[in-house]
Amino acid sequence: MPMTRLTRKGIKFAWDEACERAFQQLKKRLTTAPVLVIPTRELGYAVYCDASHDGLGCVLMQEGKVVAYASRQLKPHEKNYPTHDLELAAVVFALKSWRHYLYGEKFEVFSDHKSLKYIFTQRDLNLRQRRWMEYLEDYDFELLYHPGKANVVADALSRKPRSTAAFLAIHEWKMLEQLGEFDLEVNESAVHATLFTLVAQPTLLSRVLEAQQSDEEAVSFRARVTSDEAMDGWTFSPDSGLRYRSRPFVPLALRNDVLSDFHHSRLAVHPGGTKMYHDLRRQYWWKGMKRAVADFVSTCLTCQQVKAEHQRPAGLLQPLEIPEWKWEHVTMDFVTALPRSQRQHDAVWVIVDHLTKSAHFLPIRMTDSVDVLEDCILQAAMGTQLLLSTAFHPQTDGQSERTIQTLEDMLRACVMDFRGNWEDHLPLVEFAYNNSYQASIQMAPFEALYGRPCRSPLCWTEVGEASAFGPDLVQETIKKIKVIRKRLVTAQSRQKCYANRRRRPLSFSVGDHVFLKISPRRGLMRFGKSGKLSPRFIGPFQILDKVGEVAYRLALPPQLSGVHPVFHVSMLRKYNRDPSHVLDWTELALEQDASYKEQPIRILESKSHVLRGKKITIVRVLWKHHGVEESTWEDELETRSRYPHLFVD
């Protein structure tokens, strides 16, 4: 720069023609460049406004020169505004932003929304528009229409990116890194190239063409095509690549890389075998491609863990053995999460006899220990043997599940019709259930258990009391048990026939490796993932033993020691082994989270509300291995009784 040279030390000051030209050019640039000017009150102002679905933009100008720019994003509720209100919001935003310039001055406001110029004569205004009109009355301005094509500055401000220039530069380089992950080579047209001048070239195709030069099969095909041998569909591309029906031939050494690129890439995201084959066959070719794609997809570890099954559930129905006598086989389950009763009970222990279908409903507390429950039925004294059902498969004990469903319906009906506490209705619900007809045994459980119908106030008639006592009672009971067993066999046969129509047989061998199906519901296994994004299957695990016809015992890692290791076949999926699989168990560091228990971490907040004149306080609980968005509102009294440590200061 000539003028800069004059400022150096030891240089004689000499103003020549070069300095004069530089000085004149500098004055021109300073006076004509789009820089902000200092406003003058006598010249008046012009405001240009525009609105879009992203934000508001406005420009304050004076004699065609910019005094100030202003823009902002739309607030969430503003995105629901109609176009008319959005354009008016842009005007209000401009006047509020430059009130120190415009208040007391006469100026013009330009908008590309033509109907806005009639806002001052419009009769029907909503509350929002009335509030804004009161504010606009403070200013002396004229609202004019300005075509959108000419309103380029305000329009650009209303639609400008939300990020700054520095943030955009960071994203450009992040995008360059992602292009590299997609196996794309980026050629920059300049040292500081932007994404607008990028040229992306695939490197996989160049590797395929290079590998064709050394592949034996490709060399053989190339020689036959060169010798003019009859090779229908085989040609050479301009880059000397060997093609079959205009598709590059993939040598054996690169086929696995091509399959991996079309399956594991972020642009593919693990497609199924059919989709992947049709996408791949449009760009490449080799003999046996369809079988290679099917084998590759079937052995993909991620697909085996996350893909859903689209076929009938596995495992044919296996009816339980019919017991010889009453109360020989008993099933049990729990109804939980009930409102806490006056006796502090919040659950029902359901015990059902497998033969007579007789049921007992015992109110309990969920905080009761196992020892307390054992004492309720004298397990140790009676020599009862406890058999666990398969994990996470409630169909194993379908009898208890069906009884619980009926119990819950009866309790709901009692609470609605008779009011009061659910525990007060429980004895009558048990009586009504045991005295109702059961389709499987074709009689009431009471009659099956005691050998005679129950005398109910609903039908207070003679029921043969003379035969209800004495030696005939035993014979009558034995006869009924034989009839019940025959009816149960018929019922089981009918149920098995219906169920197996919608199921398929599936079996594994001891020593096989299988995946275990997990549930994404709250309270079950998460395995390092949140909610619905947790994998469908984990593993693989080795089968140690076959339990019955449709259950298997698995070799679970120590992290899952709290889970019963016997699973129904419908919970398992065959593992297709591949040498490239790397199995990592670090995500299984669950401690106690593999069970149904949830561990609270802390109380986030609390609030109170009035229900039927009673003040109830609830607290928001954050649970272990769950985010804040999965926190739940719980009753304070119940939470304090279960987790008192959360309320210690």
Image (cartoon, rainbow, N blue to C red):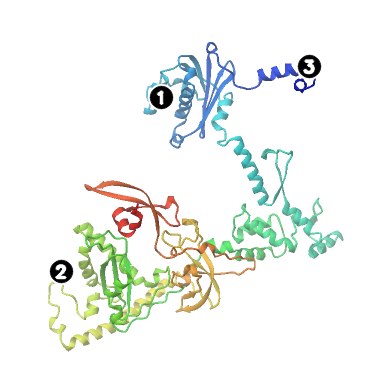
Q: Secondary structure at mark 3?
A: loop
CA gap between label 2 and label 1 equals 73 Å
CA gap between label 3 and label 2 equals 124 Å
| Amino acid marked by disc 3 | Phe
Which mark is on residue 132?
1
Q: Secondary structure at mark 1?
A: helix
| Amino acid marked by disc 2 | Leu
Q: Residue at x 43, y 59 (%)?
A: 521
**In the image, is 302 to the left or to the right of 641?**
right
How many numbered markers are drawn?
Answer: 3
Which mark is on residue 458?
2
Quarter where residue 466 is shown: bottom left
The residue carrying mark 3 is 13
In the rendered view, would you say 29 is above or below 325?
above
- Locate residue 6, reporting x and y percent: 77, 20
In the rendered view, would you say 355 is above or below 191?
below
Q: Residue at x 61, y 61 (%)?
A: 273
**In the image, is 331 to the left or to the right of 71?**
left
Quarter where residue 10 is shown: top right
- Locate residue 497, reporting x and y percent: 41, 74
In the rendered view, would you say 82 is above or below 114?
below
Q: Are marks 3 and 1 in contact (CB under 8 Å)?
A: no
Q: Are marks 2 and 1 in contact (CB under 8 Å)?
A: no
